[in-house]
Amino acid sequence: MPPPTVTKRLTLAAAAGAFTAACSPLTLFATLSPKDAAARVSRGEAYGDHPRQTLDVYAPRGIAGLAPIAVFFYGGSWDSGRRQDYNWVGHALASRGFVTVVADYRLYPEVRYPLFLEDGARAVRWAADNARRFGGDPERLVLAGHSAGAYNAVMLGLDGRYLAAAGVDPRHVRALAGLSGPYDFLPLKGDITNRVFGQTSDLPATQPLAYVGPASPPAFLATGDADNMVWPKNTIALAQRFRAAGVEVEERHYPGVDHVRMVLALSRPLRGRAPVLDEMTGFLRRHAV
């Protein structure tokens, strides 16, 4: 029989192996990755009746007065994703001075466009209604997201009808941040966009470019030049629309960064690869005053 110390190591190794086998790489990363100095102050808050209409809240430490609120939407092709797997994003944004909400939303095949946007608007309404519980200012909102979540954040910020229907004044959205988002994907070509948007009679109305105007909130739009999942042309096209409308936009292209590494650059272990977090939160802070 091996000595106790060896037995303990074997047991821990077996447990770690079983845990790894049972979890996705992102779940494992969210579990083991070191986090920024911020606090998750509430978990599993319901903003609706559906099990996926839930969110987590993260708050900065040691900030006097009310902080701006960031609502973050993760990606996953509108058919996958869990807020728990993005806890490191919540910690990262909160460490930069934002009361941060990371929200789940309903997914395909249960819903298609535009129902996940309606969920997002309801999550923003919850954030505004509960802001002061966590030290946040309900009139200083910023919306951010990655990939499909960037589409959600940008659409909510540009097409104010969703927020207004949920009871949120769209003027309270001070700025947007989209990381590697699809904003210009007509005609529909891939399986993902066809299944999520293909039932829509007015396809041009699904495109964020259609809603940019002089009253749009300023935007931070970033992509990686190695992204072959959501082509950088989406970011280029949307940034051009902002400039044509006379609205401030900060467009960033990070060399050597692919689709996944764009969002992972927000995490403590990987943010040295690209200054995404510093540049994005710097832009958002300047406008959330």
Image (cartoon, helix red, strand yellow):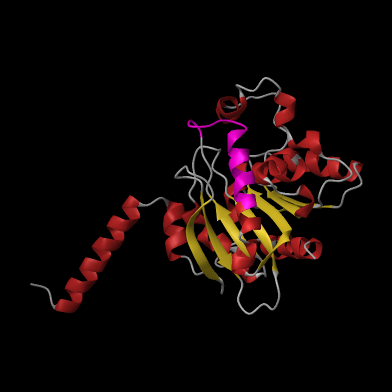
Q: Nearer the viewer, residue 33 or 61?
A: 61
Q: Residue furthest left?
A: 1
x, y percent for residue 248: 86, 52
What is the tally of numbered marks visible in this picture? 0
> Quick one: quadrant of the N terminus?
bottom left
From where the camera sits, is residue 213 visible? yes
Tell me where the magenta segment starts and ends, as one range: 108-125
Q: Nearer the viewer, residue 104 or 283?
A: 104
> Quick one: quadrant of the C terminus?
bottom right
Q: Quadrant of residue 213?
A: top right
Q: Nearer the viewer, residue 147 or 131?
A: 131
Q: Is residue 233 above or below residue 250?
A: above
User: Residue visible at 74% across and 37% down?
Assistant: 208
Question: Taking 78 as reference, is 137 left or right?
Answer: right
x, y percent for residue 13: 27, 65
Q: Nearer the viewer, residue 173 or 147?
A: 173
Q: Is residue 111 magenta?
A: yes
